[in-house]
Amino acid sequence: MKQTAPSDILCIGSVLWDVIGRAASHMRQGSDVPGRITRLPGGVAMNIAMTLARFGLRPVLLSAIGQDPEGDELIDACRKLGMETAHVYRSEDLPTDRYMAVEGANGLIAAIADAHSLEEAGDKILRPLTGGALGSEAQPYEGIVALDGNLTKSLLETIAQSPAFARADLRVAPASPGKAERLLPFLSSGRATLYVNLEEAGLLCQDEFPDTEAAAAGLLSRGANRVLVTDGGRAATEADQDRMLTQVPPQVLVTRVTGAGDTFMAAHLAAEHARADRDAALESALRAAARYVSGEMPL
């Protein structure tokens, strides 16, 4: 079995091309305004990995990327950004996934995630953790695993119960509100730390919450092991059955929103990997997310 370094963190989920259109003006349905369009490596797992690399860690990607030219280019970009790509599943038949979003001064207007290849690849992306390259059911991987909800519900259910993940420090994000309910297996298993926003917490609990403290309490009452709930520029809460901690993020001018939640999660992971206490880890994550949305942190 290949031994991973102490700084390895597995990032499992979507690695794709982000196509983002940003305008400086407020937008609504039907708006046609000038702006900038960029194409950058993205996806929840990729965004988390990029932030981890900035903190000096070595993220290991487990995802599905096509053998098309876009896939080759994406693999090359990942390597240049300091990520381990040897365990990525490269499909001959499935194209490289893409995400497209439009953002205005008033936030995200619309987005479409085309992560069908990741979904169709299914458990093939987990072979390194079940076949011995990184772990197996007999010798489970024991490090941190950052997992995103772009995987299918059935595959997430498998991960929530699989012996191959029994010793892992599982950290899970839903990818988007539309996929929040895919995280329900981790509520019933009580096995993971969940990173969600206020809307996603409400969807998981089939309820509406006035703030992140209430949302955290709701998730814990339904079996969650540990949760971090954010609400944009308002107070965020980190909680488990023993303690609830709430902090207000720094107030900044918002210039972008896509990827902010992933940056928050990665910065929190990096802080705890460096053995920061819970207060300091939450503060570090909120500060990193604020820097990101303000444009201070590079893409």
Image (spheres, rainbow, N blue to C red):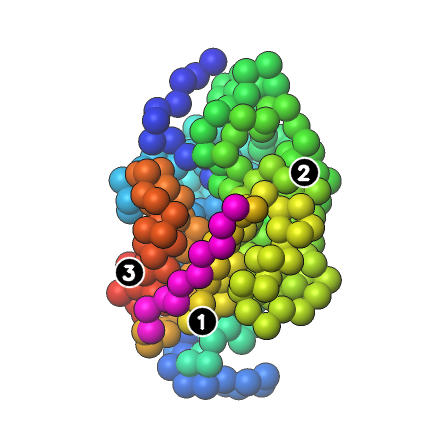
The earlier-in-sequence mark between 3 and 1 is 1
Crowd rating for badge 2 (residues with CA inside 10 Å; few <14, some 14–19, many 20+)? some
Crowd rating for badge 1 (residues with CA inside 10 Å; few <14, some 14–19, many 20+)? few
Q: For the residue marked with disc 3, what is the amino acid?
A: Met
Marker disc for residue 234: 1
Q: For the residue marked with disc 2, what is the amino acid?
A: Ser
Relative to 95, say whether 121 is above or below: above
Q: CA distance from mark 3 to mark 2?
A: 36 Å
Q: Tag 3, which secondary structure?
A: loop
- Which mark lies nearer to you, 3 or 1? 1
Specify whether 218 is left or right of 107. right
The earlier-in-sequence mark between 3 and 2 is 2
Q: Are discs 3 and 2 less than 8 Å apart at CB?
A: no
The residues colored magenta run 242-251
- Which mark lies nearer to you, 3 or 2? 2
Relative to 96, say whether 135 is above or below: above
Query: Can residue 131 be spotted in the picture?
Result: no
The earlier-in-sequence mark between 1 and 2 is 2
Residue tagged 3:
297
Secondary structure mostly taken by the magenta-highlighted segment of the chain:
loop
Marker disc for residue 70: none
Percent x, y of residue 22 = 42, 74
Residue tagged 2:
189
Query: Can residue 126 be spotted in the picture?
Result: yes
Percent x, y of residue 166 = 59, 26
Relative to 196, say whether 165 is above or below: above
